[in-house]
Amino acid sequence: IGSSERYLRYLLAWPDYRTATRAGRHLGLSCKAGKLYCNIDADGRVFACSLLIGKAEAANAIQSGFKAAFQAIPPLPCQACTAGCFTEYNYIYGLDPLCILDWMRAMRR
């Protein structure tokens, strides 16, 4: 199992499973997409995360360089999502000790 217990509790408390994202925070977790990590599409476009491909404007790292493209990421239309990888990133980059401990245990297996 690669998901932390914290993420599984986060998912269990999700208010509406028909939606993958929310405009506000969920359980107080702050999204770090576009601030600490990003998604670079095959054509060089830089998005805050892969859930925003085709839904947000994106600068091209091939044309303008990565730094400029990353700095051009627009404000997020969402602050929470059900995507396990991004939620785990947010817990880890938010320095949540329980989540980090879960991941360290998983990596030792």
Image (cartoon, rainbow, N blue to C red):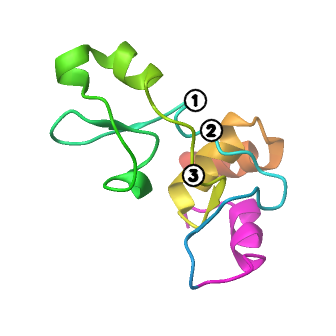
Q: Which residue is drawn at 41% across and 53% down?
A: 52
Left-right relation of 47 to 45: right
* Residue 35: mark: 1
Q: Compared with residue 5, is residue 36 higher up or lower down, i.e. above or below?
A: above
Q: Residue at x 69, y 73 (%)?
A: 11
- Residue contact between numbered discs 2 and 1, judged by CB atoms under 8 Å: yes
Helix or strand or loop: what does disc 1 sit on? loop
Work out whether mark 3 precedes mark 2 in sequence or the reverse, and give the earlier one. Answer: 2
* Residue 32: mark: 2
Quarter-of-image position of residue 80:
bottom right
Q: How crowded is mark 2: few (under 14 residues within 10 Å), some or many (20 or more)?
A: many
CA separation, marks 2 and 1?
Answer: 5 Å
Quarter-of-image position of residue 25:
bottom right
Work out whether mark 1 precedes mark 3 in sequence or the reverse, and give the earlier one. Answer: 1
**Residue 82 point in image, percent of width and height:** 59, 67
Helix or strand or loop: what does disc 2 sit on? loop
CA separation, marks 3 and 2?
Answer: 13 Å
Left-right relation of 39 to 99: left
Q: Residues within 10 Å of mark 3 (few under 14, many from 20)?
A: few
**Residue 91 point in image, percent of width and height:** 71, 46
For the magenta stretch, what is the residue range?
1-17
* Residue 25: mark: none
**Residue 76 point in image, percent of width and height:** 57, 45
What type is the residue that disc 1 sits on?
Answer: Lys
* Residue 77: mark: 3
Q: Compared with residue 20, is residue 46 higher up or lower down, i.e. above or below?
A: above
